[in-house]
Amino acid sequence: MPYGKIIAIANQKGGVGKTTTSVNLSAGLSLRNKKVLLIDFDPQGDSAKALGYTEPNKMKDTISNIMLEMIVSDECDIENRIIHTEEGFDLIPANEKLSNIEKMLENIEDKETVLKDVLKSVQDKYDFIIIDCRPSLGMLTINAFTCANSVIVPTQPEYLSATGTQQLLSRIQKTKNDQNPQLEVEGILITMADERTLLGKEINKQIHENYGKHFHVFTNKIPRRVSIAESSAVGKSIFKYDSKSDGANAYHVLAREVDLNAKREIKRHRDTITR
Ligand SMILES: Nc1ncnc2c1ncn2[C@@H]1O[C@H](COP(=O)(O)OP(=O)(O)O)[C@@H](O)[C@H]1O
Ligand SMILES: [Mg+2]
């Protein structure tokens, strides 16, 4: 039985590695033989682009028309819209039309639960559904938090001290209280880490001091590497582009940890049911 775990990759700051992490975590999990669906949930369509679909605005089937169907008729055909990528996982792309959906959401009832309803029919077919959020805490991101089991917060060391992270964590807490009691922070993931500089080391220490008490901070950091940026630019995961690199290794380790977490949660869940 697939895990059916939904993970949102979120940070309202742009350029912190959300898309890169979404794509490479999805690829890393499929290399572990997990069935994965990646939902691009940013009107920029960067996840699709990072997988070689260079013109998402020309794509007909995206998360927008699926959500629109759900809004208009309370049902949707998601399965026929899924793309099977060469990386071994499935994708639902996004494009600029998703901004219109976000505006539309403001005026409907149950605006927080549209994505949840959309994913209901496919959730049990996947081990993981990864949602690449847009850089904002607007209604799309709230939709992602409302259906997710957990959130991974990629962040560049320079941004962590900023109040933005605090806002993000409070938003997650608010969704947990209001809509989705199961929501957890899977972990704060440091991306584009520069281990060699003294500043890098100092920032690391601060991150653990500031957040480590309340949230899991992945000890495995994603290093800043040109090959990681290049792999997205040519539309491939780091595993296909440069499988022996330490960037690939870091994403392997992340995928392993995420996979083992899910396995442990399922075991705990089963234990409580049979007790
Ligand atoms: N570990 C990394 N090392 C070097 N460049 C990276 C790394 N992670 C992401 N990038 C690059 O940084 C930019 C922003 O990353 P991206 O994943 O698109 O962030 P976001 O989705 O949060 O806006 C992209 O050009 C990407 O290729
Ligand atoms: Mg992005």
Image: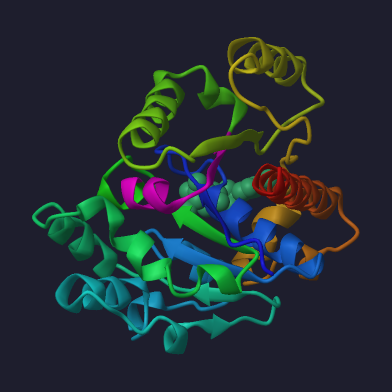
Task: Identify the residue at the far right of this view.
Answer: 244
Task: Give percent across and percent down for residue 77.
Answer: 36, 84
Name, please, the residue furthest toward the left: 107
Residue 195 placement (x, y as % from top left): 79, 27
Q: What residue is at 40 percent from the left and 28 percent from the top?
A: 173
Q: Residue at x 49, y 82 (%)?
A: 82
Residue 219 is inside the magenta segment: no
Q: Identify which residue, 85 or 54, lies in the foreground.
A: 85
For the N terminus, which image quadrant?
A: bottom right
Image-based side of 20 in relation to 28, left or right: left
Q: Is residue 79 left or right of residue 88?
A: left
Q: Residue at x 56, y 24 (%)?
A: 158
Instruction: Report the colour scheme.
Output: rainbow
x and y percent of residue 244 in the render?
Answer: 91, 59
Magenta segment, which residues?
142-155
Left-right relation of 221 to 77 = right
**Would you place residue 230 above or below residue 87 in this image?**
above
